[in-house]
Image (cartoon, rainbow, N blue to C red):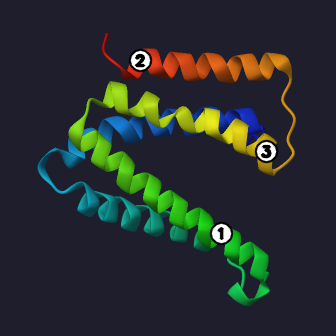
Amino acid sequence: MTTSWQFWAILSAAFAALTAIFAKVGVSAINPDFATLIRTVVIMAVVAAIVAVTGQWQPPASIGGRTWMFLILSGLATGASWLCYFRALKLGDAARVAPLDKLSVVLVAVFAAAFLGERLSLANWLGVVLIAGGTVLVAYRA
C-alpha cells in the first residue's frame, strides 16, 4: 500500500466525483436531508468496520480536549457541507454543483494561509485563482 499523499488525494477526487453522480440519482426521489442521513449511516458503518478490522480503535479518554473540540467542529462543518451539497444536487445539475462545491479548494488555501500560517508560492496562488475562475466558468451558464 502506498503512503503518498498524492495517491490518496487522487483517490479522494475520484470518489468525490462518484459521490456527485451517485448522490444526484439518489436524491431524485427523496428529501435531500434524509438522503444525507442515509449516506451518513453508511459512512459510519464502513469506517467502524475499517477501524475494527485493522485494530485502529483507541479509547476515547486517550484523546485530548483540544483534539475533541476540533474533530467535533470538523464533524459539524462536514454535516453542514453534506446537507447543503445534497440540497444543491437535488436542485441543480451535478456537472455544475460539484465544481462550485470545489470552491472549497480556494477557501482552504485562503484559510490555511490566514489561520494556519501555511505559505503558498506565487505559482500556487496563480493556481488557486485559476481554480476559482474555472469553477465560475463551469458552474454558471453564459
Residue occupying the point 39% across, 41% down: 19
Q: Residues within 10 Å of mark 2 (few under 14, many from 20)?
A: some
Q: Which residue is mark 3?
A: 114
Residue 138 marker:
2
Q: Nearer the viewer, mark 3 or mark 2?
A: 3
> Secondary structure beneath disc 1?
helix
- Residue 41 in picture, x, y percent from top left: 38, 68
Q: Quadrant of residue 120?
A: top right
Nearer the observer, 34 or 53: 34
Residue 86 marker:
none
Whichever of labels 3 and 2 marks the residue nearer the N terminus, that label is 3
Q: Quadrant of residue 61?
A: bottom right
Q: Quadrant of residue 70?
A: bottom right
Residue occupying the point 75% across, 73% down: 67
With respect to residue 14, does 52 lie above or below? below
Whichever of labels 1 and 2 marks the residue nearer the N terminus, that label is 1
Q: Amino acid at mark 1?
A: Leu
With respect to residue 7, does 86 lie above or below? below
Q: Which residue is mark 1?
A: 71
Do tag 1 and tag 3 residues touch (Cβ < 8 Å)?
A: no
Residue ranking furthest to the left = 29
With respect to residue 74, does 27 lie above or below? above
Q: Residues within 10 Å of mark 1 (few under 14, many from 20)?
A: few
- Residue 55 in picture, x, y percent from top left: 68, 73
Q: Amino acid at mark 3?
A: Ala
With respect to residue 29, does 71 lie above or below? below
For the residues labelled 3 and 2, the Cα–Cα distance comes to: 27 Å
> Secondary structure beneath disc 2?
helix
Residue occupying the point 71% across, 44% down: 111
